[in-house]
Image (spheres, grey):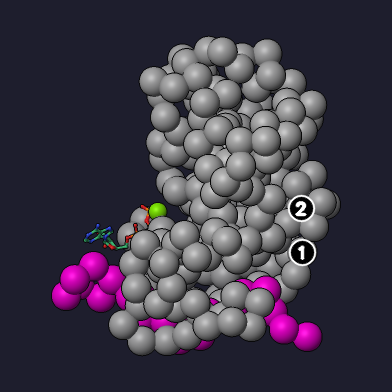
Amino acid sequence: MTSILDVQNIFSGYGKIEVLHGISIHVEQNEIVCIIGPNGSGKSTLLKTIFGLIKPSQGSILLSGKEIAQAEPEEKVRMGLSYIPQGKNIFPSLSVRENLEMGGTPLGHSKAIEKAIRNLFQRYSILDNRKEMKAGSLSGGEKQLLALAMGIMVEPKLMLLDEPSLGLAPKMIEEIYGRINSINHEKVTFVIVEQNARKALRLAHRAYVLDLGLNRLEDTGEGLLNNEEVKRLYLGG
Ligand SMILES: Nc1ncnc2c1ncn2[C@@H]1O[C@H](COP(=O)(O)OP(=O)(O)OP(=O)(O)O)[C@@H](O)[C@H]1O
Ligand SMILES: [Mg+2]
């Protein structure tokens, strides 16, 4: 069986600064794969490279068996990839509805966008109730929920999420992770980068630890939760 995503020996960085020195990960259909590691270990750089915002200098990235290492993000979106970057991922001066329209832009037709928004409002009543509000006036958790909703407008096969729980209150982290879990049950595969590792490892089927731009460990989520080294270094003892 072909992996949905197969990253093989990727070297990547910013100009002359190499950040990833030969990273490999694979993700199977319907998995939730989590990537953890200390600040600056290259987690965000890996997601940016997979999405095509940065082109790797070496290595291969296969999406459903097709080589995409040098492809542009727009092409990858058409192939079913969705990426939610770390931090501010919404348009604060636009309304919630307008943000969703932006998320649906790759769908092309306004009818298709309208239909996707209607479906979404049925499942995300928090957003429906706030649809005319400026996105900038939402709470941190609601903003992250909106970012997630924008990401699923195009009905992706594989979502790349960078720190979805960063800065959120515990209750909102529950909400976001619950949503990720239900989207996963609708046959969407996830790669989730998290610094706050415990929550993500509980949800993940498998996980990788990166360190200094290299693969350090790989195991099931549960395996890493119980790993002494991971406990000491990444889970606060
Ligand atoms: N735009 C950039 N230009 C140059 N160097 C960068 C850029 N973005 C990140 N870096 C460097 O690349 C390295 C890896 O950064 P990256 O953001 O991938 O790490 P990270 O694991 O996501 O860290 P964090 O947990 O803090 O989000 C760091 O040394 C960082 O300083
Ligand atoms: Mg990061």
The answer to whether marks 2 and 1 mark residues whose Cβ atoms lie closer than 8 Å is: yes
Counting from the top left corner in percent of width and height, residue 19 is at: 30, 72
Quadrant occupied by the N terminus: bottom right
Q: Badge 2: how crowded within 10 Å, few (<14), some, or many (20+)?
A: some
Which tag, 2 or 1, sits closer to the chain's start?
1
Q: Position of residue 198 (x, y in %)?
A: 62, 50
Q: Identify whether 67 is placed above or below 140.
A: below
Q: Counting other residues with Cα less than 10 Å from the Cα at mark 1, is it few (<14), some (14-19), or many (20 or more)?
A: some
Which residue is at a point 53% across and 83% down the rendered structure image? 67
Q: Is residue 46 above or below residue 26?
A: above
What's under tag 2, amino acid-wise? Asn
Q: Which mark is residue 165?
A: none
**Is 178 in front, or is 220?**
178
Element marked by disc 2: helix
Q: Position of residue 117 (x, y in %)?
A: 68, 31
| Residue indicated by mark 1 | 30
What segment carries the magenta color?
1-23
